[in-house]
């Protein structure tokens, strides 16, 4: 019984490196798109559109997870950011989407 209480408490703790990990994943996405853009492609316009969409989606993830640091953003967005940073399942969903975006960016040209 004591172990379950400890696990619930641990899973509700803030992950202090979550935001920096997501920013690093965004930087990796930028490098992936830069390297992919160096490869010749017959579908250059569609590739640019796809990469633009992926970068915008990942930028939204970064914005939502770092919003509490910017007082100029709306209060609703900052509260959503706090909820994400304090909720284990929400962090896992954000991380999964980030990995999926990076995976799609790496595989899009193949």
Image: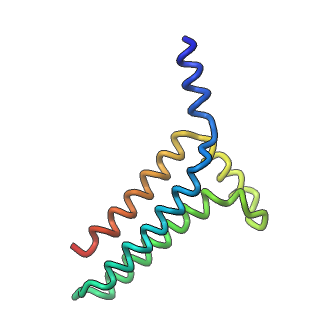
Percent across and percent down for residue 104 are 33, 65
Task: Give the quarter of the image for residue 61.
Answer: bottom right
Q: Residue furthest top?
A: 1
Lateral position of residue 53 relative to residue 65, left or right = left
Q: Quarter holding the N terminus?
A: top right
Percent across and percent down for residue 108 are 28, 71
Percent across and percent down for residue 97 are 43, 56
Which residue lies at the image location 31% right of the left edge and 68% below the top edge? 106
Towards the viewer: 43 or 10 = 10
Q: Quarter holding the C terminus?
A: bottom left
Task: Give the quarter of the image for residue 71.
Answer: bottom right
Lateral position of residue 4 relative to residue 66, left or right = left
Q: Residue furthest right?
A: 71
The correct choice, above or below, for 106 with respect to 96 in the image is below
The correct choice, above or below, for 99 with respect to 104 in the image is above
Which residue lies at the image location 62% right of the left edge and 47% below the top edge? 16
Lateral position of residue 71 relative to residue 99, left or right = right
Which residue lies at the image location 42% right of the left edge and 51% below the top edge? 96
Task: Give the quarter of the image for residue 39.
Answer: bottom left
What number of labels is visible? 0
The correct choice, above or below, for 12 with respect to 58 in the image is above
Percent across and percent down for residue 15 are 59, 44
Which residue lies at the image location 41% right of the left edge and 74% below the top edge? 31
| Colouring scheme, one of rainbow, by chain, secondary structure, one colour | rainbow
């Amino acid at each position: 019984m004591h172990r379950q209480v400890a696990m619930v408490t641990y899973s509700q703790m803030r992950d202090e490196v979550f935001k920096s990990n997501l920013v690093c994943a965004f930087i990796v996405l930028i490098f992936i798109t830069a390297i992919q853009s160096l490869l010749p492609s017959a579908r250059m316009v569609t590739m640019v559109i796809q990469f633009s969409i992926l970068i915008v989606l990942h930028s939204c993830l970064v914005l939502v997870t770092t919003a509490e640091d910017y007082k100029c953003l709306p209060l609703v967005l900052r509260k959503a950011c706090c909820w994400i940073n304090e909720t284990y399942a929400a962090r896992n969903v954000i991380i999964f989407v980030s990995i999926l975006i990076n995976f799609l960016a790496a595989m899009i040209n193949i």
